[in-house]
Amino acid sequence: MSVKQLARFFTTEIWRITRGDVSPLRYVALGLVKKVLLAVRFFTKKRVLSKAAALTYSTLLATVPIMAVVFAVGRGFGYNKYIEVWFRDALSSQPQAAEIIIGFVNSYLVHTQSGIFLGVGLLFMLYTVLMLVSNIEEAFNEIWQVKTSRSVFRTFTDYLAMFFVFPILIVLSSGISIFLATVAKQMPDFLMLGVAVRLLIDLTPYVLMSLMFIALYVFMPNTKVEVKHVIAPGILAGIAMQGLQFVYINSQIFLSSYNAIYGSFAALPLFMLWMQISWSICLFGAELCYTNQNLDYYDYDAHAGEISHRYKLMLCALIMSRICRRFAEGKSPYSLMELRKETTIPIRFVNDLVYELIEAGLLMEVTSDEKGEQSHFLPAMDISCMTMGMLIDRLEAKGTWKIDLNLGELLSQEGRKAIELRSEYLKKARDIKLQNM
């Protein structure tokens, strides 16, 4: 097989293979390949590396305030020492950065308690923390193609709960590690059992890191994420992060010249580079979660912006006719997945086209504030007034900027005739009701 044929297979032919064309084992293998291909393509096309850079900047600003909150909660419950040990272990590849951040955090808490930064300091802390979490949620929602963010109430309650639960999880993980280490020391005479416990201790960081990514992938997007679809990406992301730690720790000898030039200042660029790679791993894992859950609905590898305007009008008319007909029958409104099953239009098309119809004032979204609850869609006006002509006119006129031109003077007689023909075409199309299509 030539390179050209191989490229055509991975770009076109692989997406046309159905379950009945190949054996079950080969179909599963092709599914894994398609998931990785989609994740890589989305990762590059959506400029995820730029999002990772933005999150790196936000993280750099919010690291001290966030750790100040975590340390403050830890001190309130009396386990701040465990949190400090965990933080040093988490940044074992960046020991200088860990020392600097812990110093900043302790100074931050001392000044806050003394009242020097009680007003401005708390506001800055809340702003940087909310900005970071908001940027993370925005990045995950864009990956999952979620159009609506959490409400203010859910943002406050969800993130407040996260900041209180996070220190507790740190203490539990530290306690498990200490318990396993103690058991390993007390079993020198049990050769096989001692080896097993030591192996379990070595695997503990990988397990904890994987669990952290799995929880992040399930919790952060403002949509329903099935746990079974994030387990494999979460484990891969956890292993990749531990591999990054290993590389950084074992490459310190190569960075000695860098430290000799920049001194203690070298900790900042190295920490930012580590953070950039970490966020890239995290976001690529999120892309894998999305493709893992939604591969069955990628009948075609395209989105609404890549189809012709004529075909888009036809698909919008098909969607609107189903929604209007369901409304006229007095049945419950469609969700996106129900529209996909009813019309057989790929889910990405349905998602993009429905929100274009909302922007055009033809549909309205009905949703609850609960995470994972599906949105439903209703006609935005009396369905007796909704016609094919109105659909075409609104979609073609969608936009906020308009130039007032004197077409009577600028156009010739043939040009004015073309405008009249279009007006007659829209007038006749207004006789066709969408609910009857």
Image: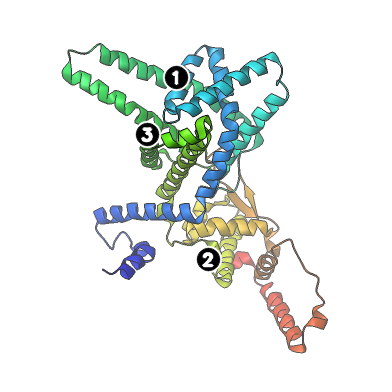
**Which residue is at the front of the view, 416 or 112?**
112
Q: Quadrant location of residue 174?
A: top left
Residue at x-position 73% and y-position 78%: 423
Q: Position of residue 356 (x, y in %)?
A: 62, 59
* Above or below for 185 versus 46: above
Q: Residue 91 at what x, y percent from top left? A: 45, 28
Residue 85 bears which disc, if any? 1
Residue bearing mark 3: 253
Mark 2 sits on what residue?
306
Q: Secondary structure at mark 3?
A: loop
Q: Is residue 123 left or right of residue 301?
A: right
N-terminal-most mark, 3 or 1? 1
Disc 3/disc 1 C-alpha distance (Å): 24 Å
Q: Quadrant of the N terminus?
A: bottom left
294 left or right of 197?
right
Residue at 43% x, 32% y: name it: 212
- Disc 2 marks a residue whose amino acid type is Glu
Judge whether residue 356 can be spotted in this image: yes
- Amino acid type at image mark 3: Ile
Report x, y in % for residue 5. 31, 69
